Amino acid sequence: MAQFKHEILEKTVTYSGEGISVRSLEEMIGGERQRQNEQVDELTGLRARNADLQAALVEEMNRLRELSDELQKSRTGQKSSLASMFSWLPWVKSTATTRRSIEDLLRRQFELSSMRLREAADFADRLEGAKIDLYDEIDRLNQRIIQSAQNEETAAAHVLQLRDLKFELEAKLAVVEPSTSEERQLTAELDRVRRQLAEHTTKLKLYSTAEDRLAGLKKNTRQLAETIAHLQSDITRYVTASSEKLDLVAGQIQAIGAAADAANVVLELKQSLDAMTESLNLTTRFVAETQAYFRQNVDTMMDDLELYDAETEKALSRNLVFNESLDDLDVENALTSALASQIDALEEFDEEVTFPVPEEVKSK
Amino acid sequence: MTDPLSGAAIPTMRLDDAQTDVYLAAFESTMRAARLNTQYPDGRLLARMGSVWSSKVHGGLYSGLELDARTGLPTYKEWTRAQTDITIAGNQLQTLGDPAVLQRKAQTHPDSAHTRNWTRYNYYNAIKEAPIAPLGEMSVAVRRVDRSRRSATFNVVLDKLDASGVFVRYSIDVEQTGDEAIATVDKRDLANNSEGFRALIYQFTSLDAEFTFVKLASMAGLKVERVIKGTIGPFFVEDMVRPDKMPSQGLVASFGLDMAAIDVETTKLNDPLATAMNAETRATYDRLGSRLGYNVFKDRKFVCSRGQVDAMKAFCEARGTRNVIYGV
């Protein structure tokens, strides 16, 4: 027993990473929160960019739809305002003039659409970059979570030994003669055990808190990453589809001027407009969908972050109180909480394991 | 170079990256060698704008270059690509953010969006000040104003990548009396050109200068002095169908000049690539020419490799023309 007691009290418990304290935990969580704020800011910027893109594309699409409708009317002999679009030209009398003017309009529209599409394509790569960064962030948080969990286990194991030693010493003290040298020796040892218990139980709670808070941050980061991934995947799909359509339109626009037959030219134009309208429709539909997605997810996430802040503050406050008034109940609570987490984790993986379960927990 | 694509709206051919870089170098030296005056589209400007297609500049963001198989020049889509990228470069650079961060991320994530964003940053940075050649722009400058006669003389210039696939510059000197057919003149004698006139000239770019002269002269209130159509293209590249007896190898670039003006002394046709007009149309034009007092001059110069200069001279002589041929 003497040897065992000596080993426990003299044992150097090594925790990985930097040491932990209430202040360092506060700083770490604050730093992580700051990083996440920046990520949310970036996402908010992306959302604003998305809104700009939407407004521009809707305007373009409306113009094209109007032109396309008028062309369709003029082709079917209905009264259209196509002529009035060029009515300010005193010499506009023939289909040919109308045709070329439309070619000009089409080109301008195509060039504007190409610009929007290029910006959208670049935007897709920015989103993918942001997604990569967020998954990197998740990796980094996982490393910290694992480290905290390992440290928590180390602390819990040591606290268990100290607690057993404390019980043993208390039992011995109960039967020795008061004021004897043996009683003084046991009391001194018990004080050392209590001191170490206080130190390592604090660490146990801090590492447990760090693990929980980091896991909370990771959850939000994963949500951000999934939002970005969803958006990036969709925009890539739409940009690809729109690019193909615009490629087709570019060839048709250049061919229009060379077409000899006016009827064919108008038909070609109609097809070009339809193709262009379709591509813009795709993009606009996508933008509308993603706007809703952003609204549903980012706003909720930001609310969660606010809530998280409050929870973190509470946890840190609890730690402060705990530091000031450590008692046996806190030790038991800390151990129970740590062991319960281990049990939960093991149930998830459904693996057979063995670990030291204190009698108190078993009896509960 | 691959075969022309089938099923496309216009026949096209695609160059890979290496071929594109060779083509661009030839394009640039050809434009320099052509010594184009202001009656032509600005060839050097086009070459500088086209430099954005170089794989050394875009760093692999794009793949090759699409040429119009009718003219050997880049297609409208490609010119729009260059125009778009140069236009948005400044804004995109700001959006992409700190280059040091982009570079670091690219290094830690090879073959990812971060690599592309870093490449894109370098691309936009390289092209942000590249010039944009007009693909369809018109300017109107006032040459003279006579307020007592309510008349003004304008110099109109329209630059356009024509539907036929060549670059065209239309230069028109015309006197306008009364109405606002072409432009209005403000108190500072600056012209505010009408959109309508732009649309009118826009439609004539595929037609010859003589047609445009006659068409404008027939409009009330206009007196035409000169219509000049300068053309860049076609460029006969490998695999393109060439006129009979033209050297079958190497790049042969052509630059047409078509002029109808009251100060051209006699009609002279010196363009070996011009298509003959049918007799009836020719007779109609001749009558109009006499009445309106203009003559026509058509010319074309060429740029080819030095080794092909003699063969090109023979080609022109065989078609009854004597043309300027620059060797590079």
Image (cartoon, coloured by chain):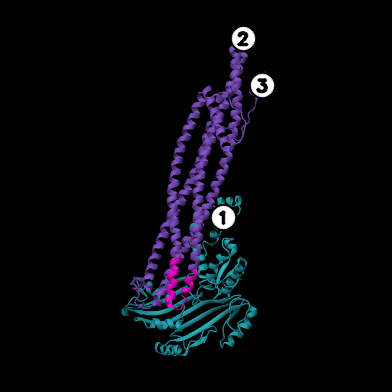
Residue B127 in the image: state x and y as whole percent. 53, 62
Q: Amino acid at mark 1?
A: Trp
Residue pointed to by mark 3 = A4
Between tags 1 and 3, which lies in front? 3
Task: State the SS at label 2.
Answer: loop
Q: Residue at x 59, y 87 (%)?
A: B317
Q: Residues within 10 Å of mark 1 (few under 14, many from 20)?
A: many
Residues under labels 1 and 3: Cα distance? 61 Å
Give the position of the N terminus of chain B as an image quadrant. Answer: bottom right
Residue A25 appears anywhere in the view:
yes
In the rendering, what colour is chain B? Answer: cyan
- What letter labels the chain drawn in purple? A
The residue segment tinted magenta is A250-275
Q: Residue at x 61, y 12 (%)?
A: A183
Residue B36 appears anywhere in the view:
no
Residues under labels 1 and 2: Cα distance? 78 Å
Label 1 is found on which chain of the structure? B
Residue pointed to by mark 2 = A180
Q: Amino acid at mark 2?
A: Thr
Q: Amino acid at mark 3?
A: Phe
Left or right of A75: which side holds A139?
Answer: right
Residue B224 in the image: state x and y as whole percent. 40, 82
Circle on res. B118: 1
Sequence-first disc among 3 and 2: 3
Label 3 is found on which chain of the structure? A
Residue A51 in the image: state x and y as whole percent. 42, 54
